Every structure is written in structure tokens, then in C-alpha cells.
Image: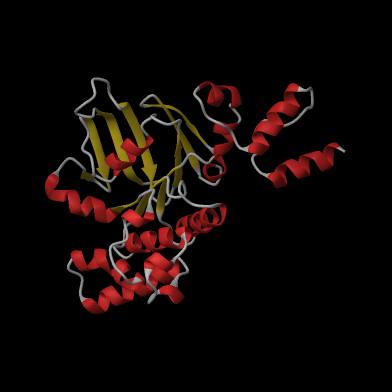
Amino acid sequence: MTAEIIAKGVCYQYAQDKSLALIDINLAINKGEFVAIIGPNGSGKSTLAKLLNGIFAPTKGEIYVDGLNTANQEDIWKVRQKAGMVFQNPDNQIVATVVEEDVAFGPENLGIQPAEIRNRVRQALEAVELTEYAHKAPHLLSGGQKQRVAIAGILAMKPQCIILDEPTAMLDPVGRKEVIKTVKKLNREEGKTIVLITHFMDEAVMADRVLVMSKGRLVMEGTPRQVFSRVEKLKSIGLDVPQVTELAHQLKRAGVEIRPDLLTVEEMVDFLCQLL
């Protein structure tokens, strides 16, 4: 597989801090891959997200997005076209008074022709299932719908990779479900590379690969099954595990012969039915 994003020996230090926020980060994210990044508060997740998009430049080391070095200021807009960023609060990304105008904002700033902009806006709103809201005012939408408008605005710039920095943290369960459904669809049906920063373990379960951060370092990575089966290790760095995995862990401690890598309710039901 071809790597979309490569980080080599990346460190980052905020100007006001003596200690490093990120320490010797090495990773490769492949084209079309869905990667979740988890870690306790202060572990460096959001800092890493901003480095991958070129908002920050590494203090040490290098990050490449589709072959472009994010530290090269001449290429920074190309980097951000290739790797679009969706933030935690959708209100901070909405700039227009009408949904379709907001989605058009990015392409307009890229100097795209009006006919192509209209086409991109239509396609982006279709992708996030908000076509019927094209002429609505964004402030009238729910939190989940606003976040999908923010995603559409990124899609209209035609990135191959979308980096989402805790996009569901401020949403209710319905909004969370809407946004994650959209993210999965963009990955599975449109082949977009997804980097999802999240503190919800049930969202990380849906990824192809999970990266675990602690105190500025990458301390673990693997498939969701590989990562979440290490319950004690995750708890030792201050993380929860999916509820089903926690139940499997407790059953195993109680003497029940059970797989430690169960992730979903369906898997648990199947196991218990066989057990009975």
C-alpha cells in the first residue's frame, strides 16, 4: 500500500513549555486507511492532528503528506488541500449564512471556476446527506448536521485525506451517530483516508488501525482487536476500553473461558449463546 502521511522522528514543543508535547513520533498512514488515534487528555492527540495538516510545523523531524513536506511554506496550501481538517466545534468552521455558501467557501478561495464550485457543493452535500438543507441557515441545524456541513466544506476542496479532531466531542448521541456514519461512508464508499482523533472507544473500534498515545509518545498500535484486548495496559495509561471488551475482561477474571478481543454486542451475544 502507498503511504498518504509519513512522520519521521517528529517532536513538537510549544513556545511556552519546557517539555516536549510530542516525542519521536514515527508513523505511516496508508491511502484509503481508517486510523483512529486515542489517548488520555494531554497525550498529544490534537497536537499531532495539527501537525499532520500543516497547522503546526515539527520542532524536530519531518511530516510528509502525499510527498509534500509540511514544513515547506511554499507547499502549505497544497498540503491542506490534500489533508482537510475538521475540528471539534462546528460553529468555529461555519462562516456563511447559508449552507451551500458555506460549503462553497473553500473552493472559492482556491480560485475554482463557478460552475465547478456548484458541482462540488452538490456532490459534497450529497456525500453527507444534507442536500435538502442547501438553502437553510446553518445556525438552525442540529450539532450533528452542523458538523456534517463542516465535513462537506472540506470535501468540496477534494482532499484525499480527512483529519477529524474529536469531531463528536460536543455532540449528543444522535449527532455522534450521524457524524460517524458519514465518516465511515466516506472511507468505505469514497476511499477517503480517515484520521480520527477520538476519546470514544466505540468510535475507535470501527477503524482499521488504532494508535495509542501517552505523554507525547506513540505507545501502542494495531488492529482494534489487538489494542483493546490489552485491557490492563490501556487502563494503566488512563484509558477505558469498549464496554463489551470490559465485560469480556471481567468474565475472564471470573473464570469464564472467553475470547479477550470481543468488541461488539453482537460478538458477545454470539459467544454467550454458544456458551449456554
Say which quarter of the image contains residue 146: bottom left
Q: Residue furthest front?
A: 140
Residue at 23 percent of width and 20 percent of height:
18
Image spot of residue 10 (x, y percent): 27, 30
- The colour mode here is secondary structure
Say which quarter of the image contains residue 138: bottom left
Residue at 29 percent of width and 42 percent of height:
50
Image quadrant holding the C terminus, namely top right
Between residue 41 and residue 249, name the one nearer to us. 41
Image spot of residue 21 (x, y percent): 30, 27
> In this rendering, is residue 270 above or below 60?
below
Side of 274 where 225 appears, left or right:
left
How many numbered marks does the figure carry?
0
Between residue 237 and residue 17, name the one nearer to us. 17
Image spot of residue 264 (x, y percent): 66, 44
Side of 104 where 151 appears, left or right:
right
Q: Residue furthest bottom?
A: 115
Side of 173 where 52 appears, left or right:
left
> In this rendering, is residue 40 above or below 156?
above
Residue at 33 percent of width and 72 percent of height:
98
Q: Residue furthest right?
A: 276
> In this rendering, is residue 117 above or below 152?
below
Image spot of residue 208 (x, y percent): 50, 44
> In this rendering, is residue 103 above or below 24?
below
